[in-house]
Amino acid sequence: MQQVLVLNASFEPLNVCTVRRAHVLVYKGKAEVLEQLQQPLRSASDTYPWPHVIRLLHYVRVPRAVKRKISRKALFARDGHRCVYCGSSGRLTLDHVVPRSRGGDSVWENVVSSCAPCNLRKGNRLPEEVEMRMLVKPRVPTPALFVTLSAARIPDRWEPYLTAYG
């Protein structure tokens, strides 16, 4: 199934949708086609551009209060599939920087990818208590990360739109 990248009016990646949904948005005048495929969409009486990247004409306010749920797939992708303590890519686990047993929440800023040996070494202590430093500071992922995770594959023509907000 062909997927279409949906950008906000500010060119920020919002989502991935079907060709049918993208065509309806364009047809109703709610979006414009920025990139299209060579072959057209055909109906019984007309032809239309086959959307590949569309941009909404009116800005959609995405509330930042709506938190994206933490998943291992998204967490590991955010951290580059590497342990934030040693940089290893083997046997990754989820680690709370401030352990839950010490009041740490399960929020993006407190959860990191950790290899099993580093996670075991840290245990229920703070990284400073065991003289461990994080190579990168945990942060809320960009919307572009979720777009790349929701698409089966990222077409080359999407890259400029995703890297600008990556």
Image (cartoon, rainbow, N blue to C red):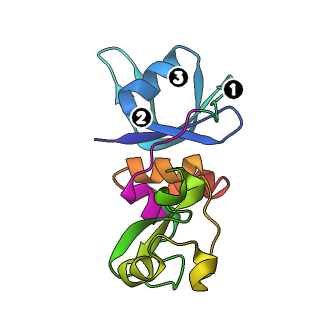
Q: Which numbered disc flags the more N-terminal residue, 1 or 3?
A: 3
Q: CA distance from mark 2 to mark 1?
A: 17 Å
Q: Residues within 10 Å of mark 2 (few under 14, many from 20)?
A: some
* SS state under label 2: strand
Any mark on residue 17, and which? 2
| Sequence-wise first label, 2 or 3 | 2
Residue 154 at x, y percent in the picture = 43, 56
Query: Does 61 sit above or below residue 53?
Result: above
Question: Tag on residue 59?
Answer: 1
Q: Is residue 129 left or right of residue 48?
A: right
Q: CA distance from mark 1 to mark 3?
A: 15 Å
Magenta stretch containing residue 69, yes or no? yes
Query: Looking at numbered disc 3 in the image, what kind of residue is underneath it?
Result: Val
Q: Residue at x 39, y 52 (%)?
A: 71
Identity of the residue drawn at 49% across and 51% down = 106
Q: Nearer the viewer, mark 2 or mark 3?
A: 2
Residue 163 falls in image quadrant: bottom right
Q: Read off the residue under disc 3.
A: 26
Q: If the image is split into quadrants, where does the C terminus sit? A: bottom right
| Label 2, label 3: how far apart the Cα atoms are | 13 Å
Q: Position of residue 99 (x, y in %)?
A: 50, 62
How many residues crowd mark 1 within 10 Å: few (<14), some (14–19), many (20+)?
Answer: few
Please name whichever residue, 151 or 116, is drawn nearer the observer in this view of the structure.
116
Does 161 appear above or below 125? above
Front residue of 131/138: it is 131
Left or right of 62 on screen, residue 153: left
The magenta region covers: 66-77
Q: Is residue 141 visible?
A: no
Could you tell me if the residues under marks 1 and 3 are in contact, i.e. CB atoms within 8 Å? no
Secondary structure beneath dot 1 equals loop
The correct choice, above or below, for 125 with respect to 69 in the image is: below
* Label at residue 78: none
